């Protein structure tokens, strides 16, 4: 529980006991959370921002003391939380390696034995003999990660730390992580990268607003997390799928929109001439749930609803996918698909559904929608929405490039004979 004060003077008065009046508001970052992790397990902790994930790890590592309850730890911990915490900027890289190792509880002889592994992993050359304050941010995190990961802990705690450095260093980090797992180390893993959670974790814990609301197999808890993201965890199941339930509610209440259950981009670039509008849209997974998260290999749909304010001949409804760098990866439209949209009149609504299998690699992708056409012989944009929402593809296995073509790979062993 954190004490939140309206004024700094209230903190001082409360600390000195100068008043009996309660001068603070109570904020519970965690409440009534119990968790057991067995030796050799890899346990993931997921949840939205502010759910208490980092607070839990700080309590386990001793950075914070719990307001109530207790923590029991059997084993030596190395934590990849705030990389570089405890580094002295005036010391050289070598001096900081010994400083951090000593803080963790290692003797000089033990650090001597690990020193070359740390230097090889960090790969910052002779800069390790320079003061840390002269390092670039990339060099700093490489050294900090190398120190934390090569100390050989019995328990490894990782909080979003595997994405530091360039792509080659990230690859090295994941290889080291896999080595720890194969060696039977105990790992607590906090990440927003659901693909990594699905791939590496034996069990997953879901936190929401400081409480534990789920625990179990990765796929089961990730599905629950998808509902938390769109505030639909308590929705009651029905024989009809979620999309049809939303469609019925939309028509009966006149206010509920599919996009209200999506996480959308508030600063998306939208424009058009106003003769027709994209009024609603959503992404639907293979169980009929409206969501921003799709499992790799599953079928899913993008649904787009368009309202016409004038008669328009053969409007084109489009959808496209980009990566985080803005590179357009794939897309289609009703014209490419050879689907006639006719001549909708004023007040008419067209709903297009684009259904496909998720063949993209694990990661986050930006989705753009378009309503265009040819009016009086000229290309016309009626409504366009660039990067209006994102789709997070959860994958337990990725290949090279943007797409997974579903290759089946076999290897046969034989022995050369000298006939």
Image (cartoon, rainbow, N blue to C red):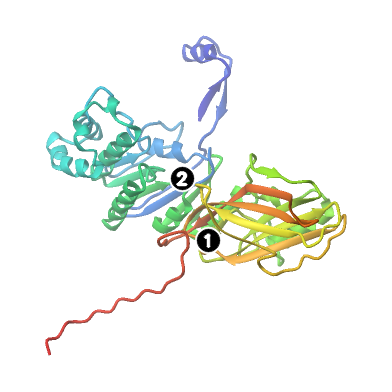
Residue shown at 63%/52% (left/top)? Answer: 368
Residue shown at 30%/76% (left/top)? Answer: 411
Whole-percent x and y of residue 83? 34, 35
Above/below status of 44 relative to 67: below
For the residue pair 318 and 279, the one nearer the viewer reads as 318
Whole-percent x and y of residue 155? 30, 46
Q: Which mark is residue 34?
A: 2
Whole-percent x and y of residue 203? 43, 56
For the residue pair 81 and 334, the one nearer the viewer reads as 334
Query: Which part of the image, by quadrant, shows the C terminus?
Result: bottom left
**Between discs 1 and 2, the one toward the N terminus:** 2
Residue 71 appears anywhere in the view: yes
Determine whether the residue tagged by mark 2 lies in a helix, strand or loop: loop
Left of 239 or right of it: where is 398?
Answer: left
The quadrant in which residue 61 appears is top left
Residue shown at 26%/56% (left/top)? Answer: 183
Q: Which mark is residue 295?
A: 1
Q: Residue furthest front?
A: 377
Query: How far is disc 1 from disc 2 in space, using C-alphas?
Result: 29 Å
Q: Residue furthest bottom?
A: 419
For the residue pair 94 and 228, the one nearer the viewer reads as 94
């Amino acid at each position: 529980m954190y004490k939140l004060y309206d004024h700094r003077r209230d903190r001082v008065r409360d600390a000195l006991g100068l008043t009996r009046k309660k001068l603070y508001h109570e904020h519970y970052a965690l409440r009534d959370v119990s968790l057991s992790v067995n030796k050799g397990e890899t346990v993931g902790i997921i949840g939205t921002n502010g759910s208490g994930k980092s607070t839990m790890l700080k309590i386990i590592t001793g950075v914070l003391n719990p307001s109530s309850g207790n923590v029991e730890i059997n084993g030596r911990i190395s934590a990849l939380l705030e990389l570089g915490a405890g580094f002295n900027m005036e010391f050289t890289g070598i001096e900081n390696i010994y400083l951090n190792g000593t803080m963790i509880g290692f003797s000089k002889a033990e650090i001597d034995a690990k020193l070359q592994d740390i230097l090889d992993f960090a790969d910052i050359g002779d800069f390790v003999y320079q003061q840390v304050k002269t390092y670039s941010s990339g060099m700093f995190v490489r050294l900090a990660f190398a120190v934390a990961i090569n100390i050989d802990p019995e328990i490894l705690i990782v909080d979003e730390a595997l994405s530091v450095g360039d792509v080659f260093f990230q690859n090295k980090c994941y290889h080291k992580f896999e080595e720890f797992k194969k060696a039977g180390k105990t790992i607590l893993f906090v990440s927003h990268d659901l693909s990594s959670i699905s791939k590496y974790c034996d069990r997953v814990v879901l936190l929401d607003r400081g409480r534990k609301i789920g625990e179990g197999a990765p796929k089961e808890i990730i599905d629950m997390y998808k509902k938390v993201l769109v505030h639909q965890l308590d929705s009651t199941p029905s024989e009809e799928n979620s999309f049809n339930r939303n469609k019925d509610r939309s028509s009966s209440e006149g206010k509920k929109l599919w996009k209200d259950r999506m996480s959308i981009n508030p600063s998306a670039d939208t424009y058009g001439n106003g003769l027709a509008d994209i009024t609603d849209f959503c992404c639907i997974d293979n169980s009929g749930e409206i969501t921003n998260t799709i499992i790799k290999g599953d079928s899913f749909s993008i649904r787009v609803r368009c309202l016409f304010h004038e008669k328009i001949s053969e409007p084109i409804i489009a959808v496209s996918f980009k990566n985080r760098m803005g590179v357009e990866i794939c897309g289609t439209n009703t014209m490419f698909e050879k689907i006639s949209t006719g001549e909708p009149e004023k007040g008419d609504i067209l709903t297009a559904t684009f259904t496909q299998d998720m063949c993209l690699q694990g990661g986050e992708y930006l989705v753009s929608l378009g309503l265009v056409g040819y009016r009086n012989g000229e290309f016309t944009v009626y409504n366009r929405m660039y990067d209006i929402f994102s789709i997070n593809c959860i994958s337990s296995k990725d290949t090279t490039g943007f797409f997974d073509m579903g290759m089946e790979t076999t290897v046969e062993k034989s022995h050369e004979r000298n006939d």
